[in-house]
Image: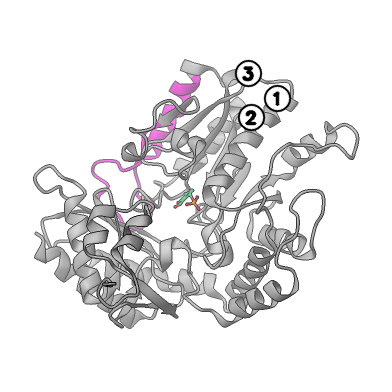
Amino acid sequence: MSHIANTNLTQAQLDAHWMAYTGNRQFKKDPRIITAASGHYYTDADGRQIFDGLSGLWTCGLGHSVPAINEAVANQVKTLDYSPAFQFGHEKSFQLAEKITEFMPAGLNRVFFTGSGSESVDTALKVARAYWRKKGMGTKTKFIGRAKGYHGAGISGFSVGGIPANRVLYGQGLEAYHLPHTQVPGTEFSKGMADTGKERAEDLLNMIAMHDASNIAAVIVEPMSGSAGVIVPPKGYLQRLREICDQHNILLIFDEVITAFGRMGAQSGSEAFGVTPDIITMAKQVTNGVIPMGAAVFKQEIYDTFMDTGGADYMLEIPHGYTYSAHPIACAAGLASLETIRSQGLIERVKQMSPIWENYVHSLKGASDAITDIRNYGFAAGISLAAVDGEAAKRPFQIAMSMWDKGYYVRYGGDTIQLAPPFTTEETEMSSLIDALGESIKKFS
Ligand code: PLP
């Protein structure tokens, strides 16, 4: 049987896997197979070392094969490999819940575990609707998302999400409307938060005028949009959303699947940008990507509303949850991951090193006419590229492939290249990543 170069794979095996968010036909012609990972580097099937320029999928801020996490997972699988998620518990879920709240803004202290970011978003949206129903305001069912937002691949996530390519195929979703995104002309190449663009929050007032607050359950935004290519909130924008939601009795949800636990050089996006929502969704960094896990964290009043109206205490206060909610192995990985972030002072490190990262990323300005914008915050950056022959996605793909050939993994999505190096990245690694990216961009300009 013939195998694909340097792998144990047959063509039939390659064909059998319908890969997620992947150009399957292109990949299967030219597979990029990863065989191992350690620290900041992957090993590919050719034995090459490849720098992880997106920390997995924004997941592995601590790098790969972190001894404390590996040990915690190995011990857990030997001790308690699974525990029923409904009606029975195990200690680590309660310990992890409390640990998560230590990273959250004051008042967000009730944690519901899920298996992914998409499930966390689903949980937040369901709870938002049920909350209003419990309060006797059952007409509050509509949601407001934002253009270019990404909230996962579920039916609810794509409904509130605003990346057109993720929506067009799927028909009717939940009733949701979208605020404009905050990539405001004239703010290109801003470092960190742009000075203008806050006014785009005022569109929420138009939506309230159109739909009435009595019909709107929640506004959901990523404090910093990740998948759209690192769109950083303009100064004052999130504060204004908060004000309007408060004035109109609408819940505010921050989807922090990317921004929670250090990526912003803060415990959360909420802390970085100084705005506290009612609900925060998270996933990815909670276990350093080692085991799937997500969570939605609620302010106590939301939790209490369900407890107070739950009927007899043996009845479910909310009929919601997943077989893998609070999976013991994920909880063990989560505790080890969050303890490592703390004990190694990684949030502070990201904060201190962010200006250095910012300088490297913005040094690409002017390297090529193809670069139309560069954005950054914390250890994240997005580079927008001009379309080639009307095809926005082509150049980012070409650049990312050229980077892979050179030994760097970067994400390409829409018209952007996205970067999010591990929290422990050294300045020399930043410098070589950006040099290589500059060369690759020039090659396709
Ligand atoms: N929300 C945000 C902000 C995300 O970035 C993502 C994934 O990238 C999700 C939700 C979905 O998470 P998952 O892919 O774990 O379902």
Q: Which mark is residue 168?
A: none
Residue at image position (67%, 20%) is: 138
Q: First in sequence, mark 1 or 3: give its number.
A: 1
Span shown in magenta: 179-208
Q: Is residue 111 visible?
A: yes
Label 1 amino acid? Arg
- Name the residue beneath numbered marker 2: 129
Q: Using residue 305 as the reference point, say whether residue 20 is left or right of it.
A: left
Q: Which part of the image, by quadrant, shows the C terminus?
A: bottom left
Q: Using residue 399 as the reference point, say whether residue 180 is left or right of it.
A: right
Residue at image position (26%, 78%) is: 432
- Name the residue beneath numbered marker 3: 139
Which secondary structure is most common in the magenta stretch?
A: loop
Residues under labels 1 and 3: Cα distance? 8 Å
Can you give x and y, in whole percent of width and height, for residue 372 in the image?
A: 18, 52
54 versus 159 height, above or below: below
Residues under labels 1 and 2: Cα distance? 6 Å
Whether ligand 1 has any atom under 8 Å from the Cβ at mark 2 is answered as no
Label 2 amino acid? Arg
Q: Secondary structure at mark 1?
A: helix
Inspect the magenta stretch and tell me whether residue 61 lies in it. Answer: no
- Name the residue beneath numbered marker 1: 133
Q: First in sequence, mark 2 or 3: give its number.
A: 2
* Mark 3 neighbour density, 10 Å: few (under 14) some (14–19) many (20 or more): some
Pointers 1 and 2 in contact (C-beta within 8 Å): yes
Residues under labels 2 and 3: Cα distance? 9 Å
Label 3 amino acid? Thr
Inspect the magenta stretch and tell me whether residue 206 lies in it. Answer: yes
Q: Secondary structure at mark 3?
A: loop
Residue at image position (49%, 24%) is: 175
* Mark 2 neighbour density, 10 Å: few (under 14) some (14–19) many (20 or more): many
